[in-house]
Image (cartoon, rainbow, N blue to C red):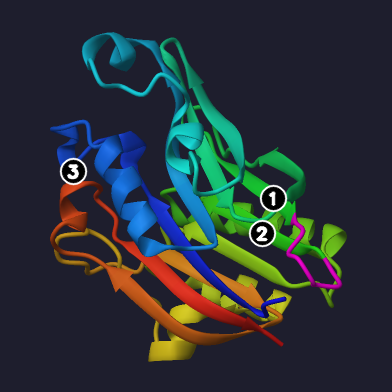
Amino acid sequence: MSDTLHVATYNIHKGFSFFRRRMVIHDVREHLRLLNADLVFLQEVQGNHSKHARRFHNWPAQPQTEFLADAVWTDFAYGRNAVYDDGHHGNAILSRFPIVRWDNQDISAHRFESRGLLHCEIEVPGWDQLLHCVCVHLALTAGHRNRQMRLLQTRIEQLVPRSAPLIIAGDFNDWTQNAQHGLARALELREAFETAHGRPARSFPAALPLLQFDRIYVRGFSVQDARVHHGHPWARISDHAALTSRLKRL
């Protein structure tokens, strides 16, 4: 039995480099494995894209969630959010532990910006309660983000026991820190980087991060450390930096 978890969150930009110059999903898989995380929260995961499959000779034959999880993360869940003629994309959670239940809640503010909350319940060996994990990718505008955070708050209040361990991670698009002042206080969450370093991580753009877009919120854990993975080679494979944190269950 272990009471520690190593978690990561990463917006993978559908497996393409900044400005979509190169297909880099194989590099994404390699570097995700180097992080050696127990749980990985992913945004902008391509579930299927027929045009890319025809264009790139080494485009993975299986959906990106399965391709990334292969032989490392035994369980995974994919929440399809945006659907279009050539395919679809959404959020995903990769897990070394069994995912016993999962659900994807549509929180889209309008049809031109599809968003969802991917909620997994995970059975960690030796733990007396299920671990609740929610992967998010929120809207670009403050008004829509605030509405989505209210929906997230309602979901947590209704479905997650106060005593259960909880991790909410992803791309919040929240440079104004509204999530910290509203959502975190209401749900008694701690943000990993604010706890470890005094402020949320700067994660965008990956080459020289300036904006605090990505977050890892926890409840029922202490934060042991938190790192931003940016610069070379990360800036070559996404416009966002990857974040990792080591957590210990209280």
- The residue beneath circle 2 is 133
Does residue 126 belong to the magenta stretch?
Answer: yes
Q: Tell me the quarter of the picture where residue 159 sits.
A: bottom right
Residue depicted at x 62% and y 59%: 149
As rendered, which of 28 and 174 lies closer to the eye? 28
Q: Determine the main secondary structure of the stretch shown in magenta.
A: loop
Q: Is residue 241 above or below residue 102?
A: below
Disc 3 from disc 2: Cα separation: 28 Å
The magenta-colored residue range is: 122-129
- The residue beneath circle 3 is 18
At label 2, which amino acid type do we have? Cys
Q: Position of residue 214 (x, y in %)?
A: 41, 63
Looking at the image, residue 81 sits to the left or right of residue 31; the answer is right
As rendered, which of 224 and 45 lies closer to the eye? 224
Q: Are marks 1 and 2 in contact (CB under 8 Å)?
A: yes
Q: Tell me the quarter of the picture where residue 162 sits.
A: bottom right
Tag of residue 119: 1
